[in-house]
């Protein structure tokens, strides 16, 4: 499974990239707006990590989505254009797949049927929002499992991104489910490092080293 960072904060992205554990970045209009920066400059800076970066525009109709995708693709290297899961979005993905060398990430996907349509249209990635599904009382990870089972059975090429991740357990479950990608907020990535037994072990070993150093030949 690949890990993307779900953030538009350049400091978070650079820090996570230095850990050497991320394979890409996903953004969305809410994450971009939070940074209060010029979007083109911000995306240019983010794409300097030279890994896939998903960016979403504002168009709703297929023609506008296709035109906008061409513009966004020029904002940096390795840009993946996020397209909303609508009939017009599916039409745009089909055209971008067949006539333009632009990778797409079908976003705001919440069901198996939506994921199927996105894969049939040729989306590079399909982003299933587990956290938002959980918020409605639906078991979001069950939907992920069903999608992955179907994609594997029919050898569908689209990669499933588990998005809207709210806990480290979501990352674990995404990996167990066989997801291609989990896109993880920075604070969850930080939480993934932590375990109380690791802390206790480091504390003990540090103390033991103090004993070792006392015995070392002066
Ligand atoms: O960026 C897409 C998705 O991960 C956003 O999730 O529900 O936390 O806004 P959410």
Image (spheres, rainbow, N blue to C red):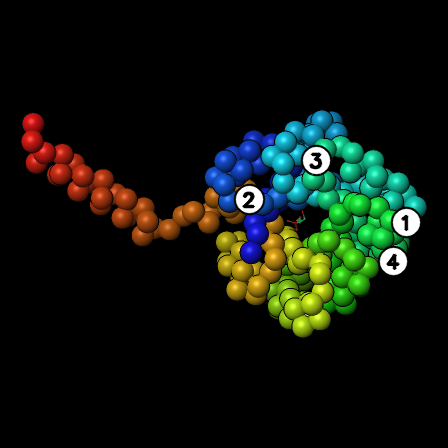
Per the model, the C-alpha gap separating discs 1 and 3 is: 23 Å
Residue under numbered circle 4: 87
Spot occupied by residue 151 in the image (x, y as percentages of width and height): 69, 67
Q: Residue furthest bottom?
A: 153
Q: Which residue was labeled with disc 3?
A: 77
Question: CB atoms at circles 2 and 1 under 8 Å apart?
Answer: no
Say whether residue 167 is visible: yes
**Is tag 1's residue or tag 3's residue first in the polypeptide sequence?**
1
Badge 3 element: loop
Which residue does the numbered mark 2 point to in the structure image?
A: 22
Q: Which numbered disc, 2 or 1, marks the residue that appears first in the sequence?
A: 2
* Some atom of ligand 1 lies within 8 Å of the CB belonging to the residue at label 1: no
N-term mark: 1 or 4: 1
Above or below for 122 versus 83: below
Determine crowd level at label 3: few under 14, some 14-19, many 20+ residues with C-alpha closer than 10 A.
some
C-alpha span from label 1 to label 4 = 9 Å
- Please state the horizontal and vertical placement of residue 200, each as a whole percent of the image: 28, 48
Q: Nearer the viewer, residue 41 or 165?
A: 41
Identity of the residue drawn at 60% across and 54% down: 181
Q: Quadrant of residue 109?
A: bottom right
The reply, left or right, for residue 139 in relation to residue 39 is left
Q: In the figure, 41 relative to 144: above or below?
A: above
Please say whether residue 110 is visible from this viewpoint.
no
């Amino acid at each position: 499974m690949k890990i993307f960072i779900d953030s538009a904060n350049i400091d978070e992205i650079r820090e996570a990239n230095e850990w050497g554990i991320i394979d890409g970045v996903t953004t969305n209009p809410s994450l971009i707006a939070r940074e209060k920066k010029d979007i083109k400059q911000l995306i240019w800076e983010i794409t300097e990590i030279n890994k896939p970066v998903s960016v979403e525009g504002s168009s709703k109709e297929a023609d506008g989505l296709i035109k906008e995708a061409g513009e966004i693709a020029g904002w940096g290297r390795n840009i993946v254009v996020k397209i909303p899961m609508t009939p017009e979005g599916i039409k745009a993905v089909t055209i971008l797949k067949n006539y333009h060398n632009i990778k797409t990430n079908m976003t705001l996907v919440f069901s198996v049927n939506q994921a199927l349509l996105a894969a049939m249209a040729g989306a590079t990635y399909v982003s299933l929002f587990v956290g938002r599904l959980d918020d409605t009382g639906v078991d979001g990870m069950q939907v992920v499992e069903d999608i992955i089972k179907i994609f594997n059975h029919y050898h569908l090429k689209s990669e499933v991104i588990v998005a809207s991740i709210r806990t480290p357990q979501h990352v674990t479950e995404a990996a167990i489910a066989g997801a291609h990608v989990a896109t993880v907020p920075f604070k969850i990535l930080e939480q993934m490092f932590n375990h109380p037994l690791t802390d206790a072990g480091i504390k003990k070993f540090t103390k033991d080293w103090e004993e070792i150093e006392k015995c070392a030949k002066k």
